[in-house]
Image (spheres, grey):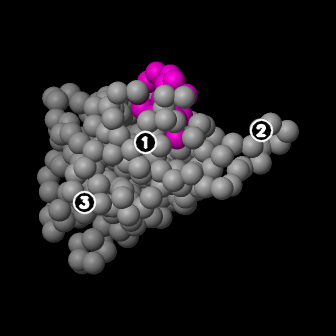
């Protein structure tokens, strides 16, 4: 770990300190924003955070240090917010429209944080942001937020609160990108636990595609590609019929990721 990264990690425990001190360790006007997706209780979730000096929720993000690659910055943000290190992470877009950051919102946050914004004015500049999406297993995440100044929570991707700046556009762009590349993105493999039901897997694809999928066709297609293995097990769900359990064939998914092999048809 570099000396600058140690400084950043210490300071990012308190965001106003990151703003208030040592801006020279960061690349000017460059940030990363991370769309962290998980699956829980039958729906696709997105992880959001909120400063208590702000009324709006936002994507976890941070600045890029001068001795960091952007990917390293995104991994640092993810580690700090989820407690996880080995995460499926992809850079997907570059956000740089003029006026993308609400200047009035930032001024108000600085005022509420009781900083001298006449001296601390670099957060009021125009920023460009590199967008990353990450796929995580919901039950493995430990939400990291200092209760003194910050909140963090999961939200259904179709029922999000009011978001800061252009973060709704960033989330929409991420889901659109995944939708277009759905055959190459191992969404089920990265989001589901080791053992899962076919309805759970179908729910993920329906959430990303934004439409219902025929149950029989989906199951037939998923089993035909050879990446999923049925187990001789069922999950007990009360008085209802116990659904069959399946598991992913890890070696095949690892090979597909390594060689860029399509793991699923784009058409359902």
Which corner quadrant holds the C terminus? top left
Residue furthest top in the image:
211
Range covered by the magenta-colored residues: 201-215
Mark 2 / mark 1, whichever is N-terminal: 1
Most foreground residue, 28 or 223: 223
Q: Answer whether residue 211 is magenta in the image.
A: yes
What x and y, as percent, mark residue 4?
23, 72
Residue for badge 3: 258
Most foreground residue, 240 or 67: 240
Residue for badge 1: 224
**Mark 1 nearby-residue class (10 Å; few <14, some 14–19, many ≥20):** few
Task: Left or right? Give the position of 57 relative to 127.
Answer: right
Which corner quadrant holds the N terminus? bottom left
Q: Answer whether residue 19 is magenta in the image.
A: no
Tell me whether circle 1 and circle 3 mark residues in contact (CB < 8 Å): no
Between label 2 and label 1, give the one nearer the viewer. Answer: 1
Most foreground residue, 119 or 68: 68
At a point 29% along the width and 60% down the height, the residue shown is 255
Mark 3 / mark 2, whichever is N-terminal: 2
What x and y, as percent, mark residue 165?
33, 31
Q: Is residue 161 shown to the viewer in this render?
A: no
Q: Which mark is residue 241?
A: 2
Q: Secondary structure at mark 3?
A: helix
- For the image, the number of numbered tags is 3
Q: In the picture shown, does residue 62 fall above or below 220?
A: below
Cα distance between the residues tagged 3 and 2 = 38 Å
At a point 49% along the width and 46% down the height, the residue shown is 38
**Mark 3 nearby-residue class (10 Å; few <14, some 14–19, many ≥20):** few
Q: Quadrant of residue 108?
A: top left
What x and y, as percent, mark residue 225?
39, 44
Cα distance between the residues tagged 1 and 3 = 21 Å
Q: Secondary structure at mark 1?
A: helix
């Amino acid at each position: 770990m570099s000396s600058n990264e140690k400084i950043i990690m210490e300071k990012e425990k308190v965001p106003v300190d990151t703003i208030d001190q040592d801006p020279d360790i960061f690349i000017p006007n460059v940030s990363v924003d991370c769309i962290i997706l998980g699956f829980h209780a039958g729906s696709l979730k997105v992880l959001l955070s909120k400063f208590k000096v702000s009324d709006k929720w936002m994507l976890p993000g941070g600045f890029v240090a001068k001795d960091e690659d952007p990917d390293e910055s995104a991994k640092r943000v993810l580690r700090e917010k989820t407690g996880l290190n080995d995460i499926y992470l992809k850079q997907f877009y570059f956000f740089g429209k003029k006026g993308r950051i609400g200047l009035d919102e930032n001024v108000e946050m600085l005022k509420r944080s009781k900083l001298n914004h006449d001296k601390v004015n670099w957060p009021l500049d125009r920023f460009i942001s590199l967008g990353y999406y990450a796929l995580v297993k919901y039950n493995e995440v430990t939400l990291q937020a200092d209760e003194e100044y910050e909140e963090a929570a999961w939200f259904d991707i179709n029922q999000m609160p009011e978001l800061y700046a252009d973060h709704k556009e960033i989330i929409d762009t991420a889901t659109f990108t995944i939708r277009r590349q759905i055959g190459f993105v191992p969404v089920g493999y990265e989001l589901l636990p080791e053992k899962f039901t076919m309805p759970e897997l179908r729910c993920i694809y329906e959430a990303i595609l934004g439409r219902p999928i025929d149950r029989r066709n989906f199951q037939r297609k998923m089993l035909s590609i050879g990446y999923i293995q049925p187990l001789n097990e069922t999950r007990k769900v009360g008085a209802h019929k116990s659904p069959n359990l399946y598991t992913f064939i890890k070696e095949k998914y690892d090979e597909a990721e390594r060689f860029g092999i399509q793991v699923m048809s784009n058409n359902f």
